[in-house]
Amino acid sequence: MTVDLVLKDGILIVSDRESVRSVAIDEGKIEGFYKHGKEPRSKETLDSRGLYVLPGLIDMHVHLRDLDQSNKEDYESGTMAAAAGGVTTVVDMPNSVPPVLSKEVLDRKIKSALSKRYVNVGFYAGIPKDIKSFDAAMAPDILGFKVYPHAPLTEGTVYDRKRIQECLKLAKDHNLPLLFHPDSSSKGDIAKSQEEYFRIHSCESEVRSLQSFLDAKVEYEARLHVCHVSCAATARLILEHRAEQTLTAEVTPHHMFLSGGDFAHDDGRAKMLPPLRSPYDAKMLSEALSTKCVLDCIASDHAPHTDAEKTAPFLEAAAGIPGLETTLPLVLTEVFEGRMSWIDFLRCCCSGPAAVLGLPNKGILAQGYDADIVLVRRQEWYISGADFYSKAKITPFEGRRVLARPISTIVGGEVVYHEEEFVARLGIAGQVPVRKPYQL
């Protein structure tokens, strides 16, 4: 037997312990695992000695812009950032310009991503003001619905109990999760000071929003996913209603590892929505992830903006930061320094998001699974936004010491990124759109 590729003598994680094995890849799938000297013949061999061989990260919350916002990011630059960061699957949010509220816009995004991607790209859809007008032909090409109660995609939409119930019913009817941004503020809430900005988007606002969705969920046992949990109180409320099949949640690295007091907030460098919280909240989120398993996923909420938008005074600056190239180094540093287990890393960055999205062939290194893999070197280095492949270069993690560097990224058995170079042609590797295996 001859396989396509062997990753020779890498470090795999088996039952939370390191073990040296070779991984054989054939026809885009993992063919098997072998001890040194027992590998099958291969067309190519990649020396993986001293490198960690891990499932590629699945980032289920990214904003890749494109279309009318290609100056901020497009599918080429965004998926380059993903591959360079060890992320092999991204799922693109629908609040683009124009928003994904019709099959015509979704098809435009799919067509663009098909020709410009380096990794797997999946999509979410927004929900039209008249829910009955949702085009069911979109359902096979999306992995969920996303709603923004504080800033609806359709003018005049109010997320009261009736609206939330209708959204939950739509999600249930199509066997898809309903993702929501927990914030009970409204578009009319305009902050006139930094203090007012943080008050408008407070932890109390986040908890109220979550409670309103939980109350509406009583009517329909649809799958509800809470995006970018930022507060300890929100995590506690999720714990009280914990239901792995119907209530899931994610956290970002910036809400786990940064706090608002770390920054002067003179400009938008550390401005995001939800905002950075207190050191207590950051500590409790890490505990909620690792010791209580309240949080299912780590997602970057990659939200690129132009330099001018981020260097503007705080109130005028855009909210959102790039994260595709920093998630793996930041989170694996927690593992290497003993604050997170391998089990939690693999669950929250790989298998957890695959489970939420209903992708049974991704997120785990196992025979027959998709060969979406990242090779990582344990190495000290310092984050520099100037080196990002993303068009967004301003990061609140500038200068932060990390201990993990992605060396090679493999998507569907194709080596895409290796030693800081892109070795696959644009538009060759990965699936677009990423689909569930079965749709109703």
Image (spheres, rainbow, N blue to C red):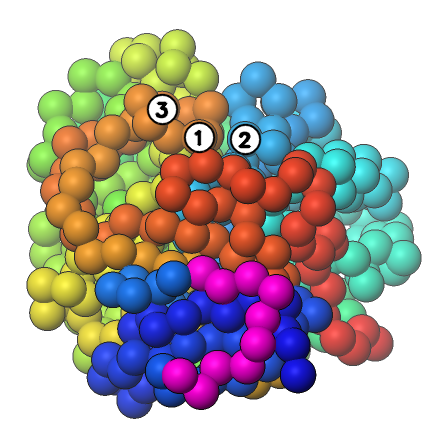
In the picture, which quadrant includes the C terminus?
A: bottom right
Q: Where is residue 93 drawn, in percent x and y?
A: 59, 45
Which residue is identified by label 3?
393
Which residues are the magenta region?
37-46
Query: Disc 1 residue type?
Result: Tyr
How many residues crowd around disc 1 within 10 Å: few (fewer than 14), some, or many (20 or more)? many
Label 1 sits on residue = 389
Residue visible at 45% across and 36% down in the picture: 421
Q: Position of residue 69 (x, y in %)?
A: 62, 22
Residue 9, image x, y percentages: 35, 73
Q: Position of residue 250 (x, y in %)?
A: 40, 62
Task: Identify the mark nearer the N-term, 2 or 3.
Answer: 2
The label on residue 41 is none
Q: Tell me if residue 308 comes above or below residue 180 in the rendering.
A: above
Q: CA distance from mark 2 to mark 3?
A: 12 Å
Q: Is residue 40 magenta?
A: yes
Count of marks, rendered view: 3
Circle nearer the viewer, 2 or 3: 2
Q: Quadrant of the N terminus?
A: bottom right
SS of the residue at dot 2? helix
**Contact (CB < 8 A) between labels 1 and 2?**
yes
Tell whether 99 sits left or right of 136. left
Q: Relative to 287, is 226 above or below?
A: above
Side (left or right) of 339 relative to 139: left
The amino acid marked with disc number 2 is Ser
Residue 77's mark? 2
Near-viewer residue (67 or 423): 423
